[in-house]
Image (tube, grey):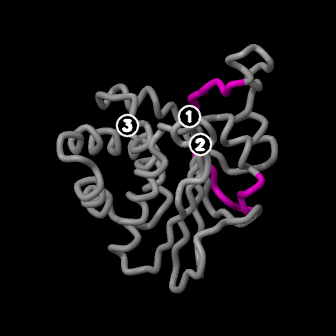
Amino acid sequence: MVKSIMIVGVGGQGTLLASRLIANVLQNKGVDVKVSEVHGMSQRGGSVVTYVKYGEKVTSPVINRGEADIIIAFEQLEAARYVSYLKKGGKMIVSTQKIDPMPVITGNASYPEEIIEKIKALGIDITAVDALDSALQAGSAKASNVVLMGVLSKVMDSPIEAWMKAIEECVPAKFIELNKKAFDLGKNI
């Protein structure tokens, strides 16, 4: 059986590192893993999507609407934008962080209200966490992606040691301890 994880966020939030961590953990379990390239304007603060598919035999990393088992949203508006990709009975992990898109910055639109409540009202299993606050506790706002990986680790059937090894293999040496702390904070939310 093939499973699908979608990672959605805004350019610069670390979606690519998150997908590498997940892929590393899964590959070390011995399953076939395919990761897509980042889709979106990753350099300009635009919407970014990364796909991770895994299982016995994966032919394509692409995830279509209604196919994602898990969606990890690094920002609330991105959760709303991609909720239709979640399969019935799927799980959504969302950071409560809000990043204003260009129409909001320029005053042409306002940031939507009560996004998480509206997603819950659809009957979706959603876990909303203040990943930014936990990342700041760990030592850097940039670690909110790894906080969310800690939350994800409670959903996935992979030992914590596999996640620690993935952090050691995917994160620059000077940031390993900070990211391990961020992961632990997420795991304990």
Pointer 1 residue: 44
Q: Position of residue 132 (x, y in %)?
A: 46, 29
Residue at mark 2 to residue at mark 1: CA–CA distance? 6 Å
Q: Residue at x 51, y 85 (%)?
A: 56
Q: Amino acid at mark 1?
A: Arg
Q: Magenta segment: does it hold 98?
A: yes
Q: Quadrant of the N terminus?
A: bottom right
According to the image, label 2 marks what residue? 41
Decide which of 10, 98 is in the foreground and name it: 10
Element on which disc 2 rests = loop
Badge 2 crowding class, 10 Å Cα cut-off, few under 14, some 14 to 19, many 20 or more, is some
What residue is at 68 percent from the left and 51 percent from the top? Answer: 125
- SS under mark 1: loop
Check whether the beta carbons of the residues at disc 2 and disc 1 lie within 8 A of each other.
yes
Of the image marks 3 and 2, the number of the one nearer the N terminus: 2
Q: Which residue is mark 3?
A: 143
